[in-house]
Image (cartoon, rainbow, N blue to C red):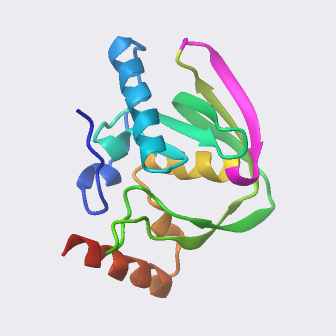
Amino acid sequence: MLQMKLCGDPVLRTECSPVTRIDGELLKTMDTMVEMMREQSGVGLAAPQVGITERFLVMMTPDDERIFKMINPRIISHSDKNCVMEEGCLSVLGGDNLPVYANVTRPESVIVEWTDENGKQQSAEMSGVPARIVQHETDHLDGKLFVDYLSGARREMVMRKVRRHKK
């Protein structure tokens, strides 16, 4: 049974290894991750968030609820134009047991390549919220959290809320 890993768990700071084989176990895990993401009203979930140190993620575009299951995703380019959006994370919870949010600056659009659950190479240009989600989730695969983009003072404010959750 998969279990959500929370801020402070070392697995969230681990750089993940590439997936070398797409098998029934991986596909079942990805399906379970989609269920977990939806149950928690999330829009993305990366393997380390459920304790797996391999490069795969699931995400959903909020407008049309399209599900992406990405194996070995790579952001191959990004726009020069940045934008600020509020981000939260199912692994970064506050005292109320809900995600803590903060404004994060990231590229407005990206081009991402990945292998889908059928073993086919895919690529897409994403902008706006979908670009934000895929950047956030691929960061997880590199052991990076959205709080890493915050200024020292803002990061400390967010982490104070997270520490209240752990008490």
Q: Name the quarter where the C terminus is drawn.
A: bottom left
Rendering quarter of residue 30: top left
Q: Tell me where residue 47 appears, x and y as whole percent.
A: 38, 38
Judged from this view, the residue extending furthest toward the front is 39
Check the image and report above or below for 16 versus 4: above
Which residue is depicted at the point 65% across and 38% down? Answer: 65
Left or right, 163 with respect to 125, comes to: left
Q: Name the quarter where the N terminus is drawn.
A: top left
**Residue 151 falls within the magenta-colored stretch:** no
Rendering quarter of residue 19: top left
Which residue is depicted at the point 51% across and 35% down? Answer: 58
Q: Nearer the viewer, residue 129 or 72?
A: 129
Left or right, 153 with respect to 52, comes to: right
Which residue is depicted at the point 28% across and 41% down? Answer: 51
Check the image and report above or below for 87 versus 126: below
Judged from this view, the residue extending furthest toward the left is 167
**Residue 123 falls within the magenta-colored stretch:** yes
Q: Tell me where residue 145 appears, x and y as whole percent.
A: 44, 60
> Magenta region: which residues?
118-129
Q: Tell me where residue 165 appears, x and y as whole percent.
A: 27, 72
* Count of picture labels: 0
Left or right, 95 with respect to 80, comes to: left
Q: Nearer the viewer, residue 5 or 67?
A: 67
Left or right, 157 with respect to 14, comes to: right
Q: Tell me where residue 53 appears, x and y as whole percent.
A: 32, 37
